[in-house]
Amino acid sequence: MNLDLTGKRAIISAGGAGIGRRTAELFTAAGARVVVCDLDADALETAKASIPGLEGSVCDVADAGAYQAFLEGAIDRLGGLDIMVNNAGTAGPTAPVEEVALEDWTACLTVNMTSAFLGTRTAVPALKKAGGGSIVNLSSAAGKFAFPMRSPYSAAKFGIVGFTRTCAMELGQYGIRVNCIQPGPVEGARIDRVIRAKAEAQGISENAMRDQMTSGTHLRSFVTASDIAHQILFLCSDAGCRITGQALSVDAGLEGLM
């Protein structure tokens, strides 16, 4: 397979750690120029120090003005754009729907869905100018299955699927492909926080909660950031040049969320 990205220009939101950082590593290794943003300044600096050629800025994607400025600046720095990865996300509250505060609902949708809209809206003119390109949005298994106690997150991730498919229909005529990834629970600090919160809400131990969650997969495991990043690389390379409008699951055979 041709997974070469030599000469490609890419932006990745939340690229300082986790899936975003691993994607930046694979993209740069494949020959792309990559600009990332992240809210965590320390993580961003660590990523820039360890990934040759990586550029990045501290930015909160929930601040629409700041994020817009970052996106426009990144496109200018790159001299155009070929790939946009809308990776930024947040877990949101863990609570029954009647106990979710409006501000928590809004904050969750802003980071998970509105940032993808802003990233896509800003990227499209540059992608059209380039003669086409690829947009990858991060949805979730929570955008495929019901997710009790996580209604804001699930709503946002279902929304990403509809947004992806609609954009694919709009932009295909310009050679722009739009897909989304639906990861199952990803090993790392975020899922550890989710497990802790869900265990507390259900009155069980964290180990019991983890076992409960992994038992719902065929492979009896969570996925890794590398699993997701490799799928993103595939989609953005020539190997994925006829794939668009898809919500692709990378979830170890997840049958449902609890």
Image (spheres, rainbow, N blue to C red):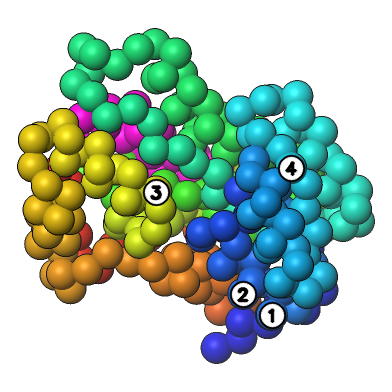
**Label 4 SS:** strand
Q: Given this view, does label 3 or label 1 mark the residue nearer the observer?
A: 3
**Label 1 SS:** helix
Residue 227, position in %: x, y?
Answer: 42, 71
Instruction: Give the CA distance from mark 2 to mark 4.
Output: 21 Å
What residue is pinned by disc 3? 190
Q: Is residue 8 visible?
A: no
* Neighbour tally class for label 4: few under 14, some 14-19, many 20 plus, Cα within 10 Å: many
Residue 44, position in %: x, y?
Answer: 69, 54
Q: Are marks 3 and 2 in contact (CB under 8 Å)?
A: no
Q: Earlier in the sequence, mark 3 or mark 4?
A: 4
What residue is pinned by disc 4? 58
Instruction: Indicate which disc residue 5 carries.
Output: none
- Comparing 71 with 198, the one in front is 198
Mark 3 residue type: Arg
Q: State the residue at coordinates (87%, 57%).
A: 78
What residue is pinned by disc 1? 29
